[in-house]
Image (cartoon, rainbow, N blue to C red):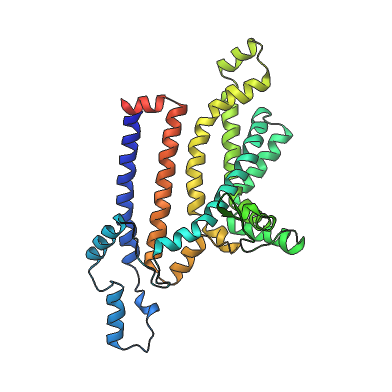
Amino acid sequence: MTVFVIRRFLQSIAVLCVTAVIVFIGIYAIGDPAEMLISPDASQAERAQVVASLGLDKPLWEQFFTFAWNALHGDLGRSFVFNRPSIALIFERLPATLELTLTGLVFALVLGIPLGLVSGLKPNSATDEVIMTGSILGFSLPSFWQGMMLIMIFSVWLGWLPSTGRGQMGEFLGLRSSLFTLDGLTHLILPAINLSLFKLSLVIRLTRTGVRETMPLDFVKFARAKGISERRIVFVHVFKNILIPLITVIGLEFGSMLAFAVVTETIFAWPGIGKLLIDSIMRLDRPVVVAYLLVIVSLFIFINFVVDVLYSLVDPRVRLGGAQ
């Protein structure tokens, strides 16, 4: 197990280094932020001074090595627009995005797993048809359209829920979150539902497929022959087997929810890192864009690493196969 963890860790470091090179070159080789930051009336000397202060007068390779050296010391550059450390701006907005993503993931799991179980245990029934039709709609409809429809129905027509902002925040055990106030919860519901709909459909289909593949197996028939109750067979024996692919997919999808929360945060004016990214791209604030991408990639790699470890704990064949 130790060798397996060390190998996965070294692979994660290698992926992060390669990603850093690709992201830096892809971002810093495009556009000229000086054109947006410097007044058209500025003199040539003033322009040269600003360009030098931002480090944009150096060759691209030298800019990268300076960036890489500073990144090893926790410095991902200063925002051109806010003149603050980019990582500080990211971490200011990250709690809001994590709050939204975790809530959306909980929605997807709490609703998706029971619906998938019901659909898998009653295949080709009216209930199964309704659930699968709903999951197909969740896959098919664009996220931005779903968000606008949620706002139209629940905010404009019914007036039940607010459509923008994070709402009032509360504090519990030193943590500040919208989850700790009623106003914050009402602001969180719509964006969390919008973010979770695609993942909800995925969880339903995965659970249903796992149940349908597992129920005809010999160990289920043997458990029934021993007189074990159907409830115990489903929630202990069957559920344990379908949990393995669910762990993998849930981990990967949590990373994708973090990365692609941009659309939801933009529609609902949620003050997370996704909205910060859009604002930074519009202003060519390169350090913030690079910092955002590297933080998201690091989170994604960390989540994959944790998923691999959990997967090997649930299914020892994974680490044994890796050792061979």
Q: Is residue 64 left or right of residue 98?
A: left
The quadrant in which the C terminus is found is: top left
Q: Residue at x 52, y 59 (%)?
A: 262
Q: Is residue 305 left or right of residue 172?
A: left
Q: Nearer the viewer, residue 42 or 89?
A: 89
**Taking 204 as reference, is 97 above or below it?**
below
**Taking 140 as reference, is 149 above or below it?**
below
Q: Residue at x 40, y 45 (%)?
A: 301
In the picture as drawn, the residue positioned furthest to the front comes out as 173
Please tell me in which quadrant of the rendered image residue 58 appears.
bottom left
Q: Is residue 163 left or right of residue 41?
A: right
**Taking 296 as reference, is 61 above or below it?**
below
Please tell me in which quadrant of the rendered image residue 263 appears.
bottom right
Q: Is residue 244 visible?
A: yes
The x, y position of residue 285, in whole percent, is 40, 69
Q: How many marks?
A: 0
**Taking 198 as reference, is 221 above or below it?**
above
Q: Residue at x 58, y 52 (%)?
A: 195
The x, y position of residue 32, in whole percent, is 34, 74
The quadrant in which the N terminus is found is: top left
Q: Residue at x 56, y 60 (%)?
A: 265
Q: Is residue 273 visible?
A: no
In the picture as drawn, the residue positioned furthest to the right comes out as 158
The x, y position of residue 201, in whole percent, is 60, 43
The x, y position of residue 95, in whole percent, is 52, 55
Please tell me in which quadrant of the rendered image residue 27 appears.
bottom left
